[in-house]
Amino acid sequence: MSLEDNVDKSKSHESFASMLNRRTVYRKSIDVRLVLGVAAFIFLVLSFAYNIPTWAAFSSFAVLFILIIGGGMKTRTTLRPPSGVSRKEADEIVDKGMKSAVNALPHPCFVVDYRGTTQYVNHAARKLFGNVTAGDPLSFRIRAPSLLEALDRVSNAGPAEIIDWSEKVPTEQWFEAHIAPLWSVSHGNMAVPRGRPGLILVTIRDLTDTKRLERMRADFVANASHELRTPLASLTGFIETIMGPARDDATAREKFLQIMLDQAERMRRLIDDLLSLSRIEMRAHVQPSHIADLPTIIRHSVDALMPVAEELGVTINIELPERPQEILGERDELVQVFNNLIENALKYGSSGKRIDIHMDNQDMSGANEAFKVTVKDYGPGIDPEHLPRLTERFYRVDVATSRQMKGTGLGLAIVKHILTRHKAKLEIDSQPGEGAAFTVTIPRHK
């Protein structure tokens, strides 16, 4: 076969992939015959009823015949398979078109027959569910009873369905499946029972991230409400006491007013942290554009918290470069990061009577350099089981101690969000009785 023949055949394949199937051609040919028959009958009746000359009726019918047959032949020529393409090759072209369409879908997708046997699997489905072989039942990979029951209903001429389910192992996941019959499509020469779809399209969406985000929001609202409700209830109770039994008791009134002031301050800190966290989340997609000197930021935080360290009897040792070390970041947000880290070390590691702050360079993937800043205390330390959750909102290792230290449970969550915006990361290393080390790794500005 010559090169020209191969090119012509390739072009024929491409043109045929966009044509309608042969049943449409057959139906249109029947329609043309029906129209011609009806037209011939009408001309015959008119010629006898109104004495129309035979030659006039025949000429009119001939014109109509040419117009209809010409349009029908044009349609038939357009829809006819190109020369050099066998029926087997035509089926392969349709098969490839189906696979291309399925692979173009962004979500995991399976195409199964009426028995639930897999015929096509797209790349997204293989990535999520592993290697799936055509010819295997769908139940080999997805064992959700609700999905298999819905698939059975659709394969028995039922309408399209949308179902969802969750899986607990190896981790909790949520999925949604859209199951739709493909009535006008069949696979190969497979015999399909009457009344059943040729193929069934099963499209799956992974809802895990959405469900987790909804749960986080619900937990956040519940925790924020609880944290605000406690001091508010305390304020209300003491106000009622001062207005009632303690109205004339100066000593009790002085004591209650001090407690009320502490509770109001606790509410203020919580509201400030909530607003700060909200502002940071709103700007999470905006990359910092200012240049800041990292050692200067750390020294500023140390100076601001020095009175607290002196009150607790804690010594802060700093080891920072004398030369400027520039980073791309928002100064105020980074000050908030190191304020939170140093303040936590002072509050929860004060028993060690010392805090070390150390800064050095780290070579990240060759040419890209970053700075590492470690804030280490020598207090009681943290159990390893708590480390993965320390940056969650309102998570506390010891609730009573945290409230006693006037913590809101949002400090490290704020730190994490700020560092994420700056393309930096936080690492926590701690063992019970050996203190805790919080290390910030932040890219260097070039």
Image (spheres, helix red, strand yellow):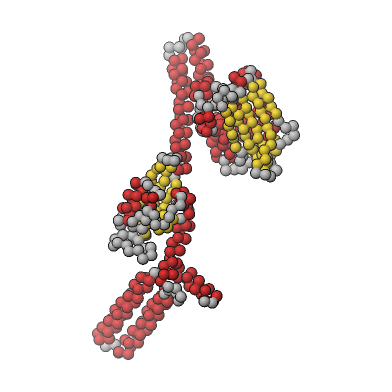
The vertical placement of 443 against 386, above or below, is below
Quadrant location, the C terminus: top right
Residue 235 coordinates in the image, percent (x, y): 47, 20
Question: Looking at the image, which is closer to me, 63 or 36?
Answer: 36
Q: Identify which residue is drawn at 59% across, 24% down.
A: 434
Residue at 59%, 40% in the rendered image: 421
Q: In the rendered picture of this protein, how many numbered marks are placed on residues? A: 0
Residue 160 percent coordinates (x, y): 35, 54
Q: Is residue 274 visible?
A: no
Left of 273 or right of it: where is 145? left
In this rendering, the answer to whether 415 lies above or below 305 is: below
In the image, 242 versus 419, the foreground residue is: 419
Q: Quadrant of residue 322?
A: top right
Which residue is most to the left? 49
Depth check: give the residue in front, 26 or 127. 127
Q: Position of residue 85 (x, y in %)?
A: 44, 73
Residue drawn at the location 37% of the way across and 63% of the way down: 186
In which quadrant of the rendered view does residue 159 lie? Answer: bottom left
**Coordinates of residue 102 in the picture (x, y in percent):** 45, 58
Residue ranking furthest to the right:
323
